[in-house]
Amino acid sequence: MRQNPALIAGAHLGHHEVVRRLFAGGAPLDHVNNLGWTALIEAVVLGDGGPDHVKRVRALVKAGADRTIADRDGVTPLQHPRARGYDASVAILRDG
């Protein structure tokens, strides 16, 4: 799989419009970085649960990001926001 650090960086920094443009241009949604995280996991783990991070999670899910890819510790994208109390992200990841 080709590398796409821009998508992962955009996901973690809260730039939802950049994220949308990258996957519209064909960036691989489910690339796993050297930490074992996808852009979806980055959006939650490195986010604050605020509006920009929720928009990013929603955009990634809407684009078809795989919600089942767990990190190296076996923690799924849904388990991360549950543990942090990010209810809006939980709802998006749970309900699609």
Image (spheres, rainbow, N blue to C red):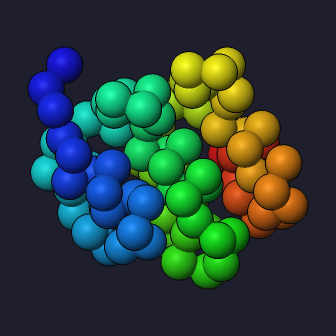
Is 76 situated above or below 4? Answer: above
Name the residue rendered at 54%, 59% in the picture.
46
Total marks shown come to 0
The picture quadrant where one finds residue 36 is top left
The picture quadrant where one finds residue 76 is top right
Is 20 situated above or below 71? Answer: below
Name the residue rendered at 67%, 19% in the picture.
74
Q: Whole-percent x and y of residue 65?
A: 46, 38
Left or right of 35 in this view: 40 = right
Name the residue rendered at 60%, 33% in the picture.
67
Q: Is residue 91 visible?
A: no
The picture quadrant where one finds residue 64 is top left
Left or right of 48 in this view: 4 = left
If the image is split into quadrants, where does the C terminus sit?
A: top right
Q: Whole-percent x and y of residue 12?
A: 43, 60
Task: Name, please, the residue furthest toward the bottom.
Answer: 51
Q: Is residue 48 visible?
A: yes
Left or right of 90 in this view: 54 = left
Q: Whole-percent x and y of residue 26?
A: 17, 42
Name the residue rendered at 26%, 69% in the picture.
18
If the image is split into quadrants, where does the N terminus sit?
A: top left
Q: Whole-percent x and y of residue 16?
A: 39, 70
